Image: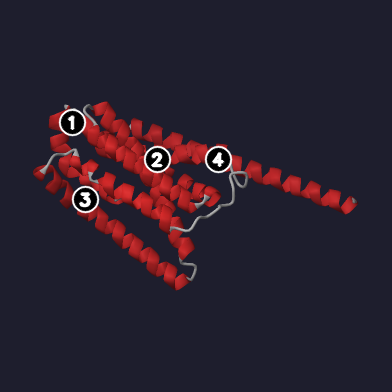
Amino acid sequence: MVILDGTIVNVALPAIQRDLGFSPSGLAWVVNIYLVPFGGLLLLSGRLGDLVGRKRVFVAGLALFTLASLLCGLARDPATLLASRFVQGVGGAVTSAGTLGMVVTLFPEARERARAIGVYSFVQSAGGSLGLLAGGVLTQALDWHWIFVVNVPIGAAAVLAAGRVLAPERGAGLGRGTDAAGALLVTSALMLGVYTIIETAAHGWASAHTAGLGAVAVALLGALEVLTKALDVSVGDQAGREAEEGFVD
């Protein structure tokens, strides 16, 4: 459903433009604004699953995605649709990260895990292809709003089923391995990187606009590297002091 929604919109774009009055440049962002948070938040969402439990992350992401789908279906102006699509991308990233994390956890043996990941990848690919077909059918038979509304009953049923079927998982806890500054840097760098790639369609790879955005993304990754080394040194010093205190005692 998450991957399907990334492609189902493409077929409905002319109807959306005609109904909501999007400009040609603004219309592209009906698709792109979903991709920015989806690509930028996958890594952070996966780490969040390790800390608070993959089931919680999956259910929360799916619920957010379902709610955003309803808001997209109810949108009557460009701003509402774009804002709802952004939230959809956030929910999609959280759901995808939680799903893959649960696949890895539920199939500990290497052969079973490889098979499960293969099935997961196939379903994702099929969802992308199915989105193009479903978008055309729903837009022609009903209305473009239904390409989003159709997610609501499916998502609601999936949330209820996940709550009953999936085993609870505690996670490591937010107090362990939580690096807020590092998470902010890597998420910002990834989202800006996705945005930069999207913008090349309008500005080209060699433009100053693209180079500037790319430079900022690289600078954020550089800052993350510096922060990581500083944290490693700090942890090492603390471990050394604790070892010395234990030796003295």
- Disc 1: which residue: 24
Pointers 3 and 1 in contact (C-beta within 8 Å): no
Q: Amino acid at mark 3?
A: Gly
Q: Which residue is mark 2?
A: 193
Residue appearing at x 41%, y 68% in the figure: 114
In the image, which disc is placed on residue 182?
4
Q: Look at the numbered discs 3 and 2 and tell me whether their residues touch, using CB distance below 8 Å.
A: no
Task: Look at the picture and state if 172 lies above or below 73.
Answer: below
Nearer the N terminus, badge 3 or badge 2?
3
Q: Amino acid at mark 2?
A: Gly
**x, y percent for residue 229:** 63, 44
Task: Work out how far the residue at label 3 is from the one at label 1, CA to CA, in angstroms.
Answer: 22 Å
Residue in the image at 19% along x and 41% along y: 146
Q: Mark 1: which amino acid?
A: Pro
Q: Confirm whether residue 65 shows in the render.
A: yes
Query: Does 185 appear above or below 98?
Result: above
Going from N to C along the chain, the mark reached first, 2 or 1, is 1
**Distance between the alpha carbons at the discs numbered 4 and 2:** 16 Å
